[in-house]
Amino acid sequence: MPFGWRPDGDVVQNVPATRRIMPFIMRSRNESAVYFEQHVDMAKAQAFIQKTRDESGAKVTLLHLVIWALGQVLEKRPRLNRFTAGGRIYQRRGIWASFSAKKGKSDDHPIVVIKKQIRPEMSFIELVTGVLESVKEGKSDKKSSTDKELAFFLSWPVFLLSWFIGFAMKLDQWGFLPGFFIRDDPMFASVFIANLGSLKMDAGYHHLYEYGNIPIFITLGQIKAENFIQDDGSVGKRSIMTVRYSFDERIEDGLYCLQSLAQFQDILEDPEKAMNSEA
């Protein structure tokens, strides 16, 4: 974009030359992807979720805690909230999370993808309420703006739809994709979260989408009991969740990313402490 900005971000200035050249020699997100795995002790998180449910009456879930923790990390570590487009690195305006949910538990129920802005100044319960409302609306029979757009575009002939998607991706690279097109599209976000644990599955490494500009994909696995050796030599059990990340390294170096993910793990492993420190 010749003006240094686009509807969802601003060009980052003073980027080292070695990073500025990366989008030109690594042109796709999946070519630029690096992968990382964490094993998170969920004992305190599970206790916190249950306590918050009992005190607030809200249907608090692990996904809510993950979204809140990501908001805190991306606020403190803003260089992780960047994306690449057209050979440039942009700082995203606002923190946005996209996540998927099934409308029902049967194989035939479709998956709905929801995009939500995370405002770090919001309390945890405010975030829970907002996410629950979005999920309820997404699971309803009401047609979302995305559903209506897709129904319209999918009514086109295949050759015309293929040309249009390619043209839209070019507009995005040039920075000319209109803001209304980006605003509700879940593929234009800071991070995508897939809670596979809610489906009794383990975490997997997910590809990054070439359409849109999401640089981080997170999958959450099923929480499992795991044996470990305690300080006194005896065997204990703890609740462990595997989290796997796919990360577009063009936006920032791996060390910055790993230090950010370490903060994310710290919050999940002791959410009450993290929230008290924010108060």
Image: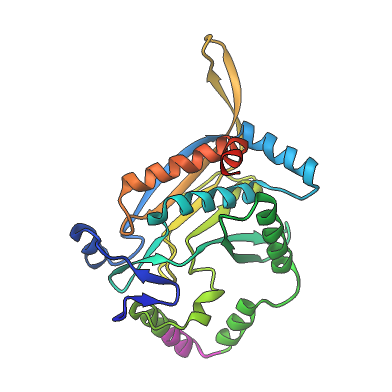
SS majority, magenta: helix
The x, y position of residue 131, in whole percent, is: 67, 59
Specify the farthest residue to the top.
232
Q: Residue at x 70, y 78 (%)?
A: 143
The x, y position of residue 34, in whole percent, is: 35, 51
Q: Quadrant of the N terminus?
A: bottom left
62 versus 93 height, above or below:
above
Task: Count all numbered tags in the image, as a single digit.
Answer: 0
75 versus 274 height, above or below:
below
* Horizontal side of residue 259 vs 157, given as left or right: left
Q: Nearer the viewer, residue 256 or 87?
A: 256
The x, y position of residue 219, in whole percent, is: 52, 50
In this picture, which residue range is highlighted in magenta? 156-164
Q: Residue at x 32, y 54 (%)?
A: 252
Which colouring convention does the figure follow? rainbow
188 versus 264 height, above or below:
below
67 versus 138 height, above or below:
above
The magenta stretch spans residue 168: no
Residue 107 visible in this rendered orientation of the protein:
no
Specify the farthest residue to the left.
17
Q: Residue at x 47, y 39 (%)?
A: 38
